């Protein structure tokens, strides 16, 4: 039996909503005001997000496995918007943060989510297992996957993304980025940093055209190369270390302490309070000028 729990109390962020459920899919449509947040909590499966042409969120879930016949979604009002949460055998994915465990006896249910996101709406989305793809978003993003690649193209606002295992690609961002993967390559381009990137195993490649903050930045990999491109007028400190590799820089660096081929500390330009930390267990480190 499908379960659909709805609590559609009209609040300023939610202007109208429609829900429909069939044997093959679940859909929800509603208007969210600019600045509101759309939350998605998904048990298992990919999430594909595109920019909407109008002011309505369009949410569609397509079942992907024979065990997903009992899978549905509930709509929960939040103080800042609305959350869409997977529901399986009376248990909601919204309850997972309160101690509920995914103790599946024969594998979790799976569905493919497609979302049209209006301009100005924030997105906070998670899936236990699956790739996440986002094309064009005009506000903050907070994305996580237990296992899967995350690819984000053309976004404004802050980006916070993580996966337990998978490639992270953030291209055409216009704000600060934080990217973290347990295993996989990290690639980031943004017109306005700062950026932080971490991976347990894989290369890191980051490009920033400008910096809007003097906060420290870290780029850490257990195994792989690290390449960071900064504005040509950057002033700050560098702390670069690699267990097995070399360090190269387009910037002139006044080295502090003894010369060490595997650990370089120094000042770039006039120096200052901002420190760039680059660390690799095994791999080369490169500091480049982005313009």
Image (cartoon, rainbow, N blue to C red):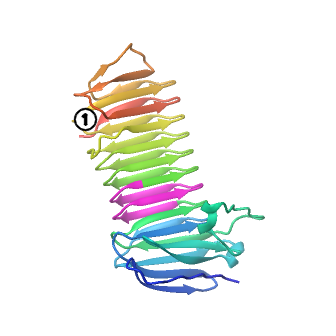
Q: Sort mark 1 into few (<14), some (14-19) or many (20+) by Cα contacts within 10 Å.
A: some
Q: Position of residue 221 (x, y in %)?
A: 50, 36
The magenta segment: 132-159
**Picture residue at 35% right of the left edge, 69% below the top:** 35
Task: Name the image quarter holding the C terminus.
Answer: top left
186 falls in the magenta region: no
Tell which residue pokes out farthest to the top in this image: 258
- Decide if residue 218 is on the left or right side of residue 71: left
State whether the magenta stretch is mostly helix, strand or loop. strand
Depth check: give the residue in front, 210 or 15. Answer: 15
**Picture residue at 23% right of the left edge, 36% below the top:** 232
Residue 10 sits in which quadrant? Answer: bottom left
Residue 104 sits in which quadrant? Answer: bottom right
**Picture residue at 37% right of the left edge, 15% below the top:** 257
**Picture residue at 35% right of the left edge, 28% below the top:** 238
142 falls in the magenta region: yes
Depth check: give the residue in front, 193 or 215. Answer: 215
Q: How many marks do you count on the picture?
A: 1
Residue receiving disc 1? 234
Q: Position of residue 206 (x, y in %)?
A: 38, 43
Placement of 17 over or under 239, stated as above or below: below
Tell which residue pokes out farthest to the right in this image: 105
Q: Position of residue 126 (x, y in %)?
A: 54, 62
Badge 1 element: loop
Placement of 242 over or under 165, stated as above or below: above
Task: Name the image quarter holding the N terminus.
Answer: bottom right
Q: Position of residue 12 (x, y in %)?
A: 37, 79
- Decide if residue 49 is on the left or right side of residue 176: right
């Amino acid at each position: 039996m499908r379960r659909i729990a709805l609590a559609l109390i009209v609040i300023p962020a939610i202007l109208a909503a429609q829900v429909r459920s069939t044997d093959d899919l679940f859909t929800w449509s509603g208007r969210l005001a600019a600045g509101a947040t759309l939350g998605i909590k998904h048990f298992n499966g990919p999430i594909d997000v595109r920019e909407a042409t109008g002011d309505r969120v369009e949410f569609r879930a397509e079942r992907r496995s024979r065990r997903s016949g009992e899978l549905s979604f509930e709509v929960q009002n939040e103080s800042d918007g609305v959350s869409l949460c997977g529901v399986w055998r009376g248990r909601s994915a919204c309850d997972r943060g309160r101690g509920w465990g995914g103790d599946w006896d024969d594998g979790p249910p799976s569905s493919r989510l497609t979302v049209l996101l209006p301009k100005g709406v924030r997105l906070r989305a998670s899936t236990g297992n699956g790739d996440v793809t986002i094309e064009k978003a005009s506000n903050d993003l907070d994305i996580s996957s237990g296992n899967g690649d995350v690819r984000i193209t053309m976004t404004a606002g802050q980006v916070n993304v993580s996966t337990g295992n998978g490639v992270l690609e953030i291209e055409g961002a216009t704000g600060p980025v934080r990217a973290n993967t347990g295993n996989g390559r990290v690639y980031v381009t943004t017109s306005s940093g700062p950026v932080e990137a971490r991976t347990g195993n894989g290369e890191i490649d980051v490009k920033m055209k400008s910096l809007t903050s003097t906060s420290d930045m870290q780029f850490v990999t257990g195994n792989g190369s690290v390449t960071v491109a900064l504005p040509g007028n950057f002033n700050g400190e560098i702390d670069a270390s690699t267990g097995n590799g070399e360090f190269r820089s387009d910037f002139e660096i006044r080295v502090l302490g003894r010369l060490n081929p595997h650990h370089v500390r120094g000042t770039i330009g006039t120096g200052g309070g901002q420190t760039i930390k680059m660390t690799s267990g095994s791999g080369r480190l490169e500091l480049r000028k982005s313009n």
